[in-house]
Image (cartoon, rainbow, N blue to C red):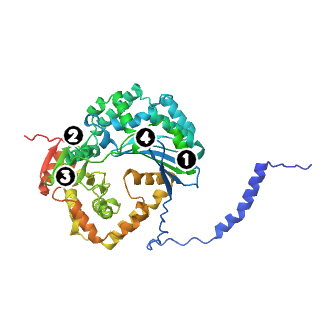
Amino acid sequence: MTTVRILSRGAAALGLTLASLATPLAAQRTAPAPAALDRTVQPAAGRTPELRVPAWERTRISNGAEIIITQKRDLPLVAFSVNFVGGAANFESPDKLGVASMTAAMLLEGTTSMTGEQLADAMQMLGTQIGTGIGSESGTITFTALKDRFEPALALLADMLMAPSFPEDALERLRARRLVALTQAKDQPGAIAANVFSKVLYGDQHPYGSVITEETISAITRDDIVAFHRAYFRPGRAVITVTGDVQPGAARAAVERAFVRWQTGGDRPSFQYPPAPAPRPTTIYLVDKPGSAQSVFAIGHPGPARDTPDYFAITVMNHILGGLFQSRLNHNIREVKGWSYGVRSSFAHGRGPGPFQAGGGIMTAKTDSALIEFMQELRGVQGGEPFTEDEITQGKESLIQSLPRRFGSVNGIGGAVATLYVQGLPERYYQEFASRIDAVTSEDLVRVARQHIDLERLNIVIVGDRAAIESPLRATGIAPVVLLDLGGRPVPTP
């Protein structure tokens, strides 16, 4: 009697697969081992990224809002944002600090036709998330959606923008959350340093020195939220961007329909700020944080606005000083000395005099030594340690080669294009970026370092364990020490 075995299709396929793999596996056993990697030879650099700035169409819809449409049709995605020129620094009153960010958050809490939960469910069904935010000098409402979900998502955003309900219970929930966060920040040296630094540089009368507190958050009412929404979210200061797999005419028509009830009005701010306090001689402002394992540094002063003609030279200089991971500051204090997880420097470049700042967290025992090194590096970029060709090349190439990736996604393109019109930059800014960076000379770097980093008028804010660091800091002789509390107010000395 003969036994017949019947294999299932899966088993038969498995047998064929194993049989087909047998030869390659055998060949692999006899293949020569790959050559060992020679780690003494630096691998060749890859291809230099190529900048491709897409074209866009710029016009206005009937209520006066600007609309900019950019096509990127390799994926069925659309990125959409309504960007607002001006932010908390321009529209908040000093006694209601925090109302801008609270209003932005409250847009997600429901509309006159949908509760907050229904709004969240609708976004989930569309596979998108609408984000809201208002910063110091701009605000945004944004989402990214599949092409066939673009118009329904746009309708949700329009409903949130034009018909928010601002429920009282949601306001109290968000208020409680903010108050907890502010309480927690009082125990975080980094947050303390940031707030005190702003206060020391700009004082209470300048918007850049404004610090949200428990008192200002507690004072915000629903009426304040409604009033801020009515005053701020106006089409006259809006820059709408649509980026992705769209036809410009159809996209503009969709936006026009969605915002047909958004009434005209709204002027853009002038960004005229009151003067910052007169500069003072270099001073160490010490904030006591008993038992802190680190001292957090914030060193600097008000810097130039974004429209400074020195912008490109400052950008390259700062990249070498403290922008790159391999920057002078980080290489010295982190890599060579091992005193920090990372230090850096930056120029904020606001529409007004944003701060120059250098700093980071330093182990407590090396606070005084690190301050000496910070000062040495700041003197170095002013000519004490000449810039090398390698440093300049690395700084420039890092900036130039990082630009193309901004245009690699619909969100990146939309954000880059919006930046031009929100910040008032030239339309060919990105096309000319590389040549402007390349044109910076070593003489330019020293000149802007001397002009925009004033070593005689630095504000050196250090948050740390006073008992451990005060005497060593005084012994450096770099500057007198002034004691401040967590709010940046002078501490009376006995």
Give the mark nearer the N terminus: 3 vs 1: 1
Under circle 4, the secondary element is: strand
Is residue 92 shown left or right of residue 52? Answer: left
* Closer-to-camera residue (342/398): 398
Is residue 386 shown left or right of residue 39? Answer: left
The disc at residue 459 is 3
- Residue 465 seen by the camera: no
Q: How far across and down, in percent of the image, does residue 202 sit?
A: 21, 47
Q: How far across and down, in percent of the image, does residue 383 sit?
A: 22, 69
Under circle 3, the secondary element is: strand
- The residue where tag 2 is placed is 487
Q: How far across and down, in percent of the image, does residue 44 sit?
A: 47, 72
Determine which quarter of the picture holds residue 196. Answer: top left
Label 3 crowd (10 A; few <14 / some 14-19 / many >=20): many
Measuring 39% from the left and 68% from the top, which residue is drawn there?
435
Give the mark nearer the N terminus: 2 vs 1: 1
- The residue where tag 4 is placed is 132
**Vertical position of residue 435 compared to residue 17: above or below:** below
- The residue where tag 1 is placed is 251
Q: How far across and down, in percent of the image, does residue 16 sit?
A: 76, 57
Under circle 1, the secondary element is: helix
Give the residue type that dot 3 points to: Asn
Give the mark nearer the N terminus: 2 vs 3: 3
